[in-house]
Amino acid sequence: SQQGEEDPQALSIQEGENATMNCSYKTSINNLQWYRQNSGRGLVHLILIRSNEREKHSGRLRVTLDTSKKSSSLLITASRAADTASYFCAPSDGGSEKLVFGKGTKLTVNP
Amino acid sequence: GAVVSQHPSWVICKSGTSVKIECRSLDFQATTMFWYRQFPKQSLMLMATSNEGSKATYEQGVEKDKFLINHASLTLSTLTVTSAHPEDSSFYICSAPGLHPSGYTFGSGTRLTVV
């Protein structure tokens, strides 16, 4: 397993704006997952993108993966105050291996 | 979808006592459970991995005699913080590989405060 590194560490935007956060990793992966953590809660799985996929959508979420650059991005469109949370990426070699988390991106969406 | 129920949500205990945290997989069998600890404004730190029917695997620096993990069935894993001290106060979260493509399923966390 390996740890992803999210960037920026903090992001503050206005409601309705788009939020983009990035993730970099070091070695080849089977898939990459994005999670959200609301304050004082557990993590919620948002989306999983496989190494042979370049882009994936889920509602207002768009995830891209560039395996040549070993990076991924998470775009939240038309953000809402409820999107305020910390976001973590988790590169995975597949299977049921342990996930290691970085510091995350703390997103604040101001009403 | 896959759900992991974690209890208690919060607990306050006195120094020197032990606290047990339970994580149950409600609609799937969790042969593996991961236990994390999170200090305020920090990321999740993996403590250990429990596997049903075998001994848990602890990450470097985690005291296995202090953090007892039991995974006696396919739906229940427990973490017992023994002889708790104030520095053990933290947010503990469990996680299990869920149903593809749902990623991993996390419990809602347990806020432990040792006084």
Image (spheres, helix red, strand yellow):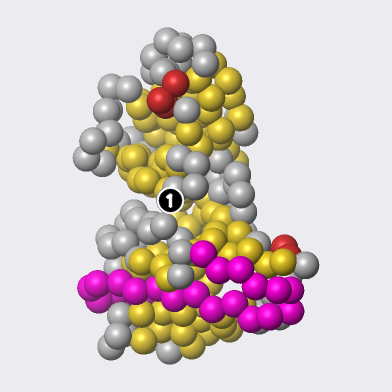
Q: In which quarter of the image is residue B35?
A: top left
Above or below: residue B16 compared with residue B57: above
Residue found farthest to the right: A111
Queried whether the magenta region covers residue A41, the answer comes back as no
Q: Name the foreground residue: B48 vs A101.
A: A101
Question: Which chain's residue wears label 1?
Answer: B
Q: Residue at x 34, y 40 (%)?
A: B47
- Measured from the top left, where is residue A77 in percent x and y? 66, 81
Vertical placement of residue B107 versus A24, above or below = above
Q: Name the residue under label 1.
A: B43
Q: Does the magenta stretch include residue A30?
A: yes
Q: Is mark 1 on a helix, strand or loop?
A: loop
**Would you call the spot at circle 1 few (<14 residues within 10 Å), some (14-19), or many (20 or more)?**
some
Q: Can residue B99 be seen in this view?
A: no
Residue visible at 42% across and 26% down in the picture: B88
| Amino acid at circle 1 | Ser
- Number of numbered discs: 1
Quadrant of the rendering where the N terminus of chain B is positioned: bottom right
Which residues are the magenta region? A10-33
Residue B106: in sight, yes or no?
yes
Instruction: Describe residue A110's horizontal placement relative to residue B6 as left or right.
Output: right
Q: Where is residue A2 in the image (x, y as percent from the top left)?
A: 28, 62
Comparing A14 with A33, the one in front is A14
At x 40% / y 64%, what residue is drawn? A90
* Residue drawn at 62 percent across, 33 percent down: B9
Q: In the rendering, at what x and y percent does residue A6 appear? A: 41, 68
